[in-house]
Amino acid sequence: DIVYNTTASGNIVLTGTTTATADDVQMNSVDAINGAGLVTAAIVDLNAQNGIGNTTALELAAALITADSSVDGNIDIDNTLAVATRVDTLSTLLGGNILFEQSGGGAVTFGTVSTGASGLPVEGEADITLSSDGANVVIGTAVTAAALGDIVYNTTTAGNVFLTGTTTAAADDVQMNSVDAINGAGLVTAAIVDLNAENGIGGGTALELASA
């Protein structure tokens, strides 16, 4: 295993590579985690207070990922893997945005993804964007954007959007863009729902919406 820690003060900055191919990488920062140095591991567990990839997106190659920013700050992660990936948690608070992009051909399943509101919510805060280039996006448990946060799901090149868990942007927009189809009975709750696909919407499993 590989573990990086900062306590009292200090960021984690990834310039070079971090490799624990058959095991775990854990990072615990009292401030932020940033840098484009490739992190390769079976499991990557990222914990910070003020952002993960908020100034420079993190580059991962991992099959199981958690990334949680406990106070505020954006999360921006790119994961490249040829086999299936599960993202158990992605979370931030106080208006931070989440951007996760999967590539390499492996499908990605999301567990619990959430943003929190700032004191004075505005557009452009608390947004969530989950994308895959070349394989499926699966919403497994719950994706929730607080306040005026939007939610966007994308597949490009290949891949469906599958809705098993819930998608909630109660005060704002949910948009889904699939190069193949969108299916699944996971409830989608939003003020506006915008669905775009090339090969069907609800053709395999009817979608369940709660939208004005």
Image (cartoon, helix red, strand yellow):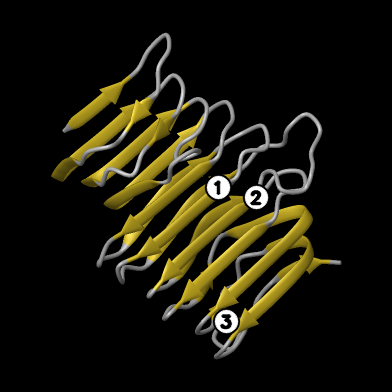
Tell me if mark 1 has few (under 14), some (14-19) or many (20+) residues whose alpha carbon lies within 10 angstroms of its own. many
The disc, 3 or 2, on the residue closer to the chain's N-terminal end is 2
- Tag in front: 3 or 1: 1
**What kind of element bears circle 3?**
loop
Number of marks: 3
**Residue at (43, 42) in percent of width and height:** 56
Q: Which residue is more in the foreground, 206 or 6?
A: 6
Tell me if mark 2 has few (under 14), some (14-19) or many (20+) residues whose alpha carbon lies within 10 angstroms of its own. many
**Residue at (37, 12) in percent of width and height:** 7
Name the amino acid, label 2.
Answer: Asp
Name the amino acid, label 1.
Answer: Ile
**What kind of element bears circle 2?**
loop
Contact, mark 1 vs mark 2 (Cβ under 8 Å)? yes
Q: Alpha-carbon distance for marks 3 and 2?
A: 27 Å
**Residue at (42, 80) in percent of width and height:** 157
The disc, 1 or 2, on the residue closer to the chain's N-terminal end is 1
In which quadrant of the rendered view does residue 74 lie?
Answer: top right
**Which quadrant holds the N terminus?**
top left
Q: Which residue is mark 2?
A: 127
Tell me if mark 3 has few (under 14), some (14-19) or many (20+) residues whose alpha carbon lies within 10 angstroms of its own. some
Q: Which residue is more in the foreground, 19 or 146?
A: 19
Q: Which residue is mark 3?
A: 205
Name the amino acid, label 3.
Answer: Thr
Percent coordinates x, y for residue 115 in the rendering: 62, 42
Q: Alpha-carbon distance for marks 3 and 1?
A: 28 Å
Q: Alpha-carbon distance for marks 1 and 2?
A: 6 Å
Q: Which residue is mark 1?
A: 98
